[in-house]
Amino acid sequence: GQQLNQSPQSMFIQEGEDVSMNCTSSSIFNTWLWYKQDPGEGPVLLIALYKAGELTSNGRLTAQFGITRKDSFLNISASIPSDVGIYFCAGQPPAGNNRKLIWGLGTSLAVNP
Amino acid sequence: DGGITQSPKYLFRKEGQNVTLSCEQNLNHDAMYWYRQDPGQGLRLIYYSQIVNDFQKGDIAEGYSVSREKKESFPLTVTSAQKNPTAFYLCASSKDNEQFFGPGTRLTVL
């Protein structure tokens, strides 16, 4: 199936640093979603974006819906050890009436205290 | 407390046996989904259902079956035809585009 290009694949940073990751696609999306998955658990929705150019924050997290509708970015400011996990992006394409999401392969984040 | 439950958390089966994974939600969501996740991999869609008594194959449906007899429940059966069933299985539900996940079931086939 179709997949989003998510980068970087992994990051190892020092506590307190800012983090940036992104997802890109060759086709447009109506919705961008960002999830975090802790080891052995289900993904948890962090931020949902519905409009091109939209910038939304959730605490130290900020995500943007790219103006071209083909990309999205997630930034984490002042990272802390509990930010460790895998971050997934997902997009909802405009075609069709089903609710299938297209997923990235994830960015694995490690934080050194 | 609204949410999605999956049981059991860990499941062990012998090769050649069918096994059914449970997924229940009390969020009143119409749509439900089953994903498979392998180590270091993303989420791959197995089956999804947009409404009771209806479901569609996802990207990797071979060797799996589902039913949707009630809005709250979407059980997944891993059949003996699935060549490599050991994986982490995630169930999700959605009302609109936002999918909400259960805690997952880790299936190990010995």
Image (cartoon, coloured by chain):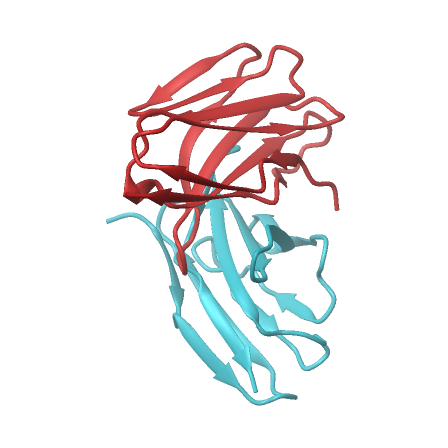
Residue sitting at x 72%, y 31%: A96
Residue sitting at x 61%, y 10%: A67
In this view, B26 is above or below B23: above
Indicate the position of residue A9 as horizontal and vertical percent values: 58, 42
Left or right of A71? Residue A81 is left
The chain coloured cyan is: B
Indicate the position of residue A82 as horizontal and vertical percent values: 29, 44
Indicate the position of residue A108 as horizontal and vertical percent values: 49, 45
Q: As drawn, which residue projects farthest toward the left?
A: B1
The answer to which image quadrant residue A62 occupies is top left
For the C terminus of chain B, the image quarter is bottom right
Residue sitting at x 34%, y 44%: A112
In this view, A6 is above or below B15: above
> In the rendered image of this protein, which colour is used for chain A?
red
Indicate the position of residue B24 as horizontal and vertical percent values: 41, 59
For the residue pair A28 and A59, the one nearer the viewer reads as A59
How many labels sit on residues? 0
Residue sitting at x 53%, y 78%: B108
Left or right of A81? Residue B86 is right
